[in-house]
Image (cartoon, rainbow, N blue to C red):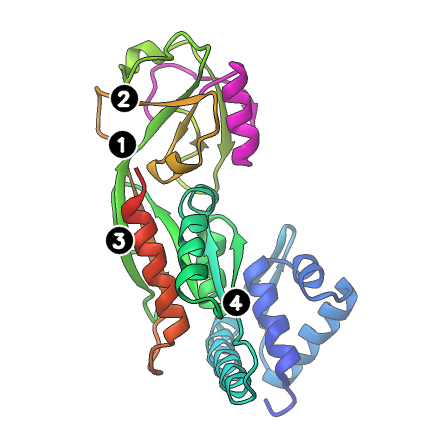
Amino acid sequence: MADLDTADLRILRAVAQRGSFTGAAAELGYTQSAISRRVAAMERAAGRTLFRRERVGAQLTEAGEVLLGHAGVALAALDAAARELEVLGQRRAAPVRIGAFGSAAAGIVPQALATVALEHPGLTTTLREGTTAVTLRALRAGAIDLALVASTPPFGPVDAREPALVPEVLSERELMLAVGAGHRLAGRRTVRVEELVGERWIAARSEGEERLLGVWPGLAGTPDLAYVARDWLTKLRFVASGAAITTIPGVLLPALPPGVQALRVVDGPRERRRLLLVRAPTTTPSDAAIDAVAEALRRAATAAP
């Protein structure tokens, strides 16, 4: 293992996080063939296969999981050392890295970063948007410091792997419905599930159990999924135009554009969504910069409508 260097560890982390050699190459600025060569060299040094090469990407083997755990610790330690050296040199500290799913990135993070800029003017941050699964992988790989992720009933552990991640519930809100100003339901505050039958929807397909993100769960019959889009700006512009309706989590309410109204669905099972702040387990002293950003995120989540 003496043949592994810092660049190798970053390549290992990037492939694990992105799920493919091509994705890791794009992130790190290498060619795909260079990534393949470095992974092969790491596997020779380790004496084990680190990734299963699959048709749609690359997945860590058990040996890869072991090495990634140690790589994350080593890279985190190097990043911490860099922060301390920057402080000694009176330079700006490295940014606190946030990962968040789309609606939290739009509805919670901007207010939190405004608070950070006001209260900690020397502290910088970065944001990486991604699905909950991608964000948790990035957190485990040491690519981000804080993760904002979503959780749907039945509420359980955010991750079953060891060592366990450390989640904190920031809020729990009802799923709501978004309609345009000219929609037949506009002007109302509530709606019943039966009134949604026959509506046209704009939604995103999900990797998880909630297959259509944007269609009301458990709606009778086959929903008219007219449009598929993951980007929230696209979805809400379609809603504003009257072309379709969609569901929205409560964390997105601060970011609703003009011409879009939120309604509560008052019958049927209560659809709830939790917003979680997740950190990686650590035995090192708490990082004051990360703590400051975490506190700003808590306050933004509490202040949201």
Question: The magenta stretch spans which residues?
Answer: 217-245
**Residue with the mark numbered 4:** 143
Nearest to the observer: residue 284 or residue 67: 284
**Residue with the mark numbered 1:** 271
Q: Which mark is first along the chain, 4 or 2?
A: 4
- Tag 3 and tag 2, C-beta contact below 8 Å: no
Q: CA distance from mark 3 to mark 2?
A: 23 Å
Q: CA distance from mark 4 to mark 3?
A: 22 Å
Query: What's the residue type where badge 1 is placed?
Result: Glu
- Tag 1 and tag 2, C-beta contact below 8 Å: yes
Depicted 107 relative to depicted 119: above or below: above
Looking at the rendered structure, the number of numbered marks drawn on it comes to 4
Depicted 225 relative to depicted 83: above or below: above
As helix, strand or loop, the secondary structure at mark 1 comes to: loop
**Residue with the mark numbered 2:** 265
Q: Which mark is residue 209?
A: none
Query: What's the residue type where badge 4 is placed?
Result: Ala
Tell me, yes or no, if residue 158 can be seen here: no
Left or right: residue 114 compared with residue 14: left
Q: Which mark is first along the chain, 1 or 4?
A: 4
Q: Which mark is residue 169?
A: 3
- Tag 2 and tag 4, C-beta contact below 8 Å: no
The part of the image, by quadrant, that contains residue 305 is top left
Label 3: how many residues lie within 10 Å, few (<14), some (14-19) or many (20+)? some
Query: What's the residue type where badge 2 is placed?
Result: Val
